[in-house]
Amino acid sequence: MKKNGYGVLMIALLVNAWNGCQSVGESEDKTETTQVDLESWKTQGQEYAMKAQQALGQNLKAALQQGGPPFAVDFCNTRAIPITDSAAQELKVSLRRVSDKYRNPGNQANEKESKYISRAKEQLAAGETIHPAIEEMEGKMIGYYPILTNAMCMNCHGQPGKDINEETLNLIKERYPDDRAVGYQPHEVRGIWVVEMDAAGATSSGHIEE
């Protein structure tokens, strides 16, 4: 009897050990799947941000060609947010541009967004690639994507008296009394795109038309 009892005990221990291994394997698979899903959302959000940036950049370039930097300042003052909203409607997501050094107070980054901007600046200063971020919050997938300055940006966001002429600077002060968005060099972090996607089903990207 003792021998049989010992055999039953060993079988029970082996079964438990097997089940334990299975649980670990399943947990690892779920973790891997979750990571893949997050990367997929991050990539999807970046595509949305790039499409919105492209729509805004094309219109801004046209404004500069049409009337120079002063005309571009008026364009940004009246058209930048509507174009962003139009892109969001076309793509069926929520899109915002925010910055720690904002021009329009409506584009001021909140605490969490400011932390991401600071981290992006640190990565850029260290010569590293700036990595987008993604998080899930209240049924939304929220992605953060850096906006870098280029030569065109210097007309309105560069060094006053050097990149920004007096006429443009005076117009900026008139349109934006609390402006903080000057003093940049090319290839610096100007701010970020914040893309909010419905976690239940942001699918393929749409096509933006002006």
Image: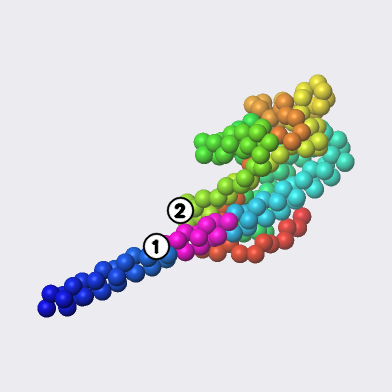
Which mark sits nearer the N-terminus, 2 or 1? 1
27 or 14, which lies in front? 14
Span shown in magenta: 27-39
- Alpha carbon separation for disc pair 2 and 1: 29 Å
Q: Main secondary structure of the magenta part?
A: helix
- Taking the image as shown, residue 85 lies to the left or right of residue 14, namely right
Amino acid type at mark 2: Glu
Does the magenta segment cover residue 135?
no
The x, y position of residue 79, in whole percent, is 73, 44
How crowded is the residue under tag 2: few (<14 C-alpha within 10 Å), some, or many (20+)?
A: few
Quarter of the picture containing the N terminus is bottom left
Q: Secondary structure at mark 2?
A: loop
Residue at 58 percent of width and 50 percent of height = 143
Q: Between tags 2 and 1, which lies in front?
A: 1
- Taking the image as shown, residue 62 lies to the left or right of residue 109, namely right
Does the magenta segment cover residue 29?
yes
Disc number for residue 133: none
Residue under label 1, please give it: 24
The x, y position of residue 24, in whole percent, is 39, 62
Q: Secondary structure at mark 1?
A: helix
How crowded is the residue under tag 1: few (<14 C-alpha within 10 Å), some, or many (20+)?
A: few
The x, y position of residue 28, in whole percent, is 45, 61
Residue under label 2, please give it: 138
